[in-house]
Image: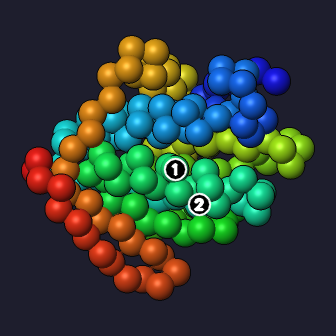
Amino acid sequence: MTLISSISGIRGTVNGPNSTNLTPIDVVKYASAYGTWVNKRNKNKVSTIVIGRDGRISGPALLELVKSTLISMGINIIDIDLSTTPTTQIIIQKKKANGGIILTASHNPKNWNALKLFNYKGEFLVKEEAEEIFKIVKENQFEFKGRLLYTSDAADEEDSVDLGGR
């Protein structure tokens, strides 16, 4: 199956040949592009992104890829783990985050997954915003830097690591 990109993010069957499926490489590229986009919109202040997932078997591995990628970009993570799309959207608003990602392929078969992307209002991106992210992917214009903060919402504990750079 072909990897599908739209205003709600990217989706496809998990693993298999690159560029025709949702592979770990695709997950890192799109998470990096999204993180770059969020950081630029946040005028390079420390950004916070909420991340959740549904119960698909590929969810935990993809969640760790997305978290690690965004953390390496100096983005604070609020990991809500198992969640629904609407709950993720509400938590983005409640926590005043700069955006969010839910890993879910909704009605698609279990071998599918997706990165659904939200803005700071907890809304799906508009066409122009999604196109900016796709352009970052196409041009490989990712920006990694900074101080890291990881928050597990379930335990409400914080850990930070300073990578320098800010």
Q: Amino acid at mark 1?
A: Leu
Task: Report the residue at 23% width, 66% height from top.
Answer: 161
User: Which label was assigned to residue 65?
Assistant: 1
- Vertical side of 45 occupied by 12: above or below: above
Gap in angstroms between the C-alphas marked 1 and 2: 12 Å
- Vertical side of 163 occupied by 155: above or below: below
Horizontally, residue 17 falls left or right of residue 115, namely right
Determine whether label 1 and label 2 are within 8 Å by CB.
no
Could you tell me if residue 73 is visible in this image?
yes
Residue 83: % across, % down: 66, 66
Task: Report the residue at 75% width, 31% height from top.
Answer: 16
Horizontally, residue 156 falls left or right of residue 3, namely left
Q: Amino acid at mark 2?
A: Gly
Residue 64: % across, % down: 53, 57
Residue 15: % across, % down: 72, 37
* Snapshot quadrant of residue 97: bottom left
Q: Which residue is mark 2?
A: 52
Horizontally, residue 82 falls left or right of residue 133, namely right
**Residue 66 or residue 83, whichever sits in front:** 66
Could you tell me if residue 121 is visible in this image?
no
Horizontally, residue 35 falls left or right of residue 92, namely left
Task: Report the residue at 27% width, 33% height from top.
Answer: 143
Residue 73: % across, % down: 30, 46
